[in-house]
Amino acid sequence: MLVVTVSLSACQTYKQKPVKLIFDTDMAPDYDDVGALAILHAMADSGEVEILAAGSSNKCETCIPCIEILNTYFGRPDIPLGAVKGEAPNIDTWHGGLRWTSELPKRYAHKIARTSDAEDVVSVYRRALSASPDTSITIVTVGFFSGMRDLLQSPADDISPMTGKELVTAKVKRLVSMAGIFLEGREFNVINDAQASQYVFENWPTEIWLSGFEIGDKILTGKRVAALEVSNSPVKDVYEMSLAQDNPEGRQSWDLTAALVAVRGWKKYFDAERGTMVVLPDGYNRWEKSDTGRHYRLIEKMPIPELTKVLEDLMIHQPVKK
């Protein structure tokens, strides 16, 4: 195992100033996206991160309403939201009983009625990037790569004279993604828009940090959230209704690990290996270890019970009154 050595400043940035972050999600097929966004808001309340924008890589019509509901609950209703407009998956939750993606928009007020009503995610991201200092932005993706592909392929416009790839090169420090399975396999976020995944991993100009399927698969969270004695909490509602249908002991934490590392860095929680994630046309991925690769995959280090507590302590955070 090649354990990378990098500057500690990347892991300690949040102690100096908030990480400037864009959150890209497929908010619907699974509900660990809800947990990921909840811990981002918890870290935002502690001054560790500033959420500049959020977008949906999924055309499911409840994605943007659910993101808006969560942002509003945590006191950040004005975070710019965008939705993918080009070719992209349209996938709802698999639950056949109580569907959290339908229940949340019924229970909580939101201004954007449907995902298709939201602004083009490319414009939202280009605006956030163009207004930011160079190499200042972390993007975390916990869904499909449709929006990232569209961003890379976007032309110069009235927002910026730079193309999408030029903007990413200039403004983005790193991309952190819940994607892939290592050392090889077929993973949900990658295979559902295989062409976009392949394009992004071949063309993304900055480093990419990967929390693979095997990382979050071992970490069950949500039980403490579902048991909270609070009312009118969309986070509690999602986990309470979903765990009852799946596993009352918790849900896998794929997306949460990516969100955690995007803000706090990897070194306290994981080891890492440098290389290249190769995506084939059908979405199958394999890992090639390399001292010169631009990709890094997380490797388990912190004991699972300790990491579970870290995530759940953030998940049970209640909104700070503004």
Image: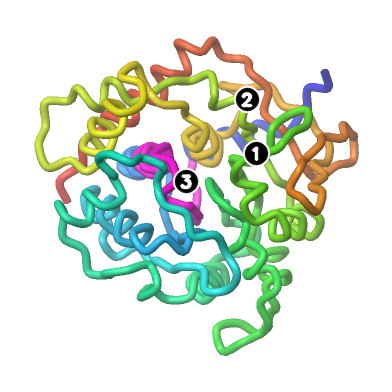
Could you tell which of marks 3 and 1 lies nearer the N-terminus? Answer: 3
Q: Which residue occupies 30% across, 33% down?
A: 242
For the N terminus, the quadrant is top right
Q: Which residue is mark 1?
A: 187
Could you tell which of marks 1 and 2 lies nearer the N-terminus? Answer: 1
Mark 3 secondary-structure assignment: loop
Could you tell which of marks 2 and 3 lies nearer the N-terminus? Answer: 3
Q: For residue 159, what is the image quadrant?
A: bottom right
Q: For residue 311, what is the image quadrant?
A: top left
Q: Which residue occupies 25% across, 40% down?
A: 98
x and y percent of residue 247 in the render? 35, 21
x and y percent of residue 37 in the render? 38, 44
Crowding at dot 2, Cα within 10 Å, few <14 / some 14-19 / many 20+, comes out as some
Picture layout, residue 41 above or below residue 102? above
Asked if marks 1 and 2 touch (Cβ < 8 Å), the reply is: no
* Residue 203 vs residue 262, the one in the foreground: 203
Q: Which residue is mark 3?
A: 17
Q: Gap between marks 1 and 2, in whole Å?
A: 10 Å
Mark 2 secondary-structure assignment: helix
* Residue 269 vs residue 195, the one in the foreground: 195
Q: Which residue is mark 2?
A: 214
Q: From which residue to which does the magenta span run?
A: 16-40
Q: Which residue occupies 50% across, 55% down?
A: 24
Q: Amino acid at mark 1?
A: Glu
Q: Which residue occupies 57% across, 64% down?
A: 88
* Residue 138 vs residue 199, the one in the foreground: 199
